[in-house]
């Protein structure tokens, strides 16, 4: 008899992707096999997102697609979870016969609800108290493992719906994090990406004075860990302890993704951000003083209501004068219940598109300059080899540039290090280096 099949689709952030992997892993352990979302399955899992209107639309479309399968074969089951589900449960119920709508803090219980065919208790995000312990030790990639260590956010920025969908900040237990990493190193993983909804808040709600820098120090001690990467961290949460760890660590990737959002102090205040451009500049300078060749990536939002040409160019000029590697540019998307949803002076969509393109052009210029800087300085770049492509072994380096190495030996899954020599395929060709 053929095993039952599960089809899963994920929208949004890496935290969502990790959680989907954990949920699907639970189904694998119970005899299921995975299939594509476009194909016939016994269970359809939609892990939704609500960060923009576009992700709302994509989440609804995926639910409707699953409902079409179910209309033909009513025995099929549909499970919807994630941030869109958390914010729009009633809307999902109105779409059709969805079997399970699971809140964001009970994803670890999905397999239990499914097995018992028991109606899930849906909890509102403001009632979330504990970290939902959701874990997997069988990730599909064999080089890089994402580890969720924190959930929720206490900040309630004016444009952002995520705190309404994820609740207050909650941190995972130290032992559970370290145990999972040790198991994954035994399975061959060497690079670990620490992630969360607001990663820098790790440990802040607890009373044991164990924060992100302490966790990083403990992960560094694990022998099988070769590289540690931070997924994203707020600018004001680069504590002196984290900066000190950066200075002495042998395993932390010199790559930091930081949400700037705006280079205008007036817009930062409207956004309810917790720093000024001067404070961001100091943080930027502190990092580059410790790690002069670090890769810095920034999130930027354009089109917040009230963003005049003058205020946009404040952001653009501020960015021009910073040393960074790339931008993630987000056109403002109106989210109900947020402070920004009631702001006046909305920006025309065509203007937002033009500004986004201008920022992306600046990003491409900065990326090229950064690549050339590392080549001119013959910076040593390291990464875990993923595959061989067109005669070159390739990896995502610790400096967040793709590296290529021409060598006949089989290097899959090995840590390679070598000096940057020349540009290749929007990445860097490195010289024959060391292998581990």
Image (cartoon, rainbow, N blue to C red):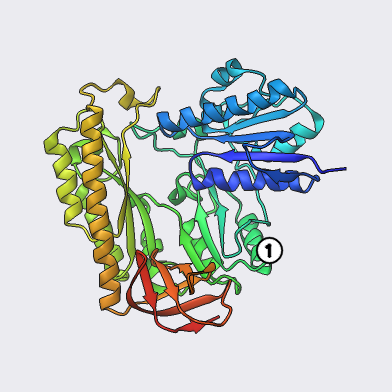
Kindly tell me whether residue 194 is visible in this rendering: yes
Q: Quadrant of residue 47?
A: top right
Kindly tell me whether residue 279 is visible in this rendering: no
x and y percentages locating residue 193 in the rendered image: 51, 58
As drawn, 143 above or below 63? below
Report crowding for label 1: few under 14, some 14 to 19, many 20 or more residues within 10 A (C-alpha): some
Secondary structure at numbered mark 1: helix
In the image: residue 267, left or right of residue 418: left
Q: Quadrant of residue 143?
A: bottom right
In the image: residue 119, left or right of residue 246: right
Image quarter of the N terminus: top right
As drawn, 272 above or below 335? below
Image quarter of the C terminus: bottom right
x and y percentages locating residue 199 in the rendered image: 46, 50
Q: Quadrant of residue 90?
A: top right
Closer to us: 32 or 250: 32
x and y percentages locating residue 130 in the rendered image: 60, 40
Closer to us: 225 or 369: 369
Residue drawn at point x = 20 percent, y = 52 percent: 319
Q: Residue furthest left?
A: 310
Tell me the residue that label 1 is attached to: 183
Residue drawn at point x = 63 percent, y = 56 percent: 140
As drawn, 313 above or below 119? below
Q: Residue furthest front?
A: 390
Residue drawn at point x = 52 percent, y = 30 percent: 59
């Amino acid at each position: 008899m053929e095993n039952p099949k599960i089809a899963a689709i994920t929208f949004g952030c890496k935290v969502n992707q990790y959680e989907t992997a954990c949920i699907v892993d639970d189904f694998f352990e119970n005899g299921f096999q995975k299939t594509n979302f476009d194909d016939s399955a016994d269970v359809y899992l939609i892990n939704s997102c609500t960060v923009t209107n576009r992700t709302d639309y994509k989440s609804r479309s995926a639910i409707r697609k699953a409902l079409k399968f179910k209309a033909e074969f009513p025995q099929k089951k549909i499970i919807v979870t994630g941030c869109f589900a958390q914010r729009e449960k009633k809307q999902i119920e109105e779409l059709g016969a969805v079997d399970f709508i699971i809140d964001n803090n009970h994803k670890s219980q999905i397999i239990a609800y499914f097995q018992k065919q028991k109606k899930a208790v849906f909890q509102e995000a403001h009632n979330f108290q504990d970290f939902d312990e959701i874990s997997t030790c069988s990730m599909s990639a064999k080089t890089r493992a994402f580890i969720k260590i924190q959930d929720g956010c206490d900040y309630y920025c004016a444009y952002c719906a995520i705190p309404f969908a994820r609740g207050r900040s909650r941190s995972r237990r130290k032992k559970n994090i370290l145990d999972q990493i040790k198991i994954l190193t035994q399975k061959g993983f060497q690079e670990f990406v620490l992630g969360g909804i607001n990663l820098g808040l790790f440990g802040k709600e607890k009373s044991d004075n164990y924060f992100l820098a302490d966790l990083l120090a403990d992960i560094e001690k694990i022998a099988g860990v070769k590289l540690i990467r931070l997924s994203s961290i707020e600018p004001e949460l680069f504590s002196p302890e984290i900066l000190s760890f950066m200075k002495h660590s042998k395993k932390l990737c010199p790559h930091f993704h930081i949400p700037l959002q705006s280079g205008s102090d007036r817009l930062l205040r409207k956004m309810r951000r917790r720093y000024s451009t001067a404070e961001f500049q100091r943080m930027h300078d502190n990092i580059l003083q410790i790690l002069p060749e670090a890769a810095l990536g920034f999130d930027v939002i354009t089109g917040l209501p009230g963003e005049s040409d003058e205020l946009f160019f404040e952001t653009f000029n501020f960015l021009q004068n910073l040393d960074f590697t790339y931008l993630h540019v987000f056109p403002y998307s109106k989210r109900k219940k947020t402070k920004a949803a009631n702001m006046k002076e909305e920006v025309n969509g065509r203007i937002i598109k033009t500004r986004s393109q201008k920022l992306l052009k600046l990003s491409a210029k900065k990326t090229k300059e950064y690549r050339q800087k590392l080549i001119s300085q013959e910076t040593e770049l390291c990464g875990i080899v993923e595959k061989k492509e067109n005669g070159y072994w390739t990896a995502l380096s610790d400096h967040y540039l793709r590296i290529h190495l021409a060598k006949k030996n089989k290097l899959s899954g090995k840590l390679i290090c070598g000096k940057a020599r020349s540009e290749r395929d929007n990445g860097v060709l490195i010289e024959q280096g060391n292998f581990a």
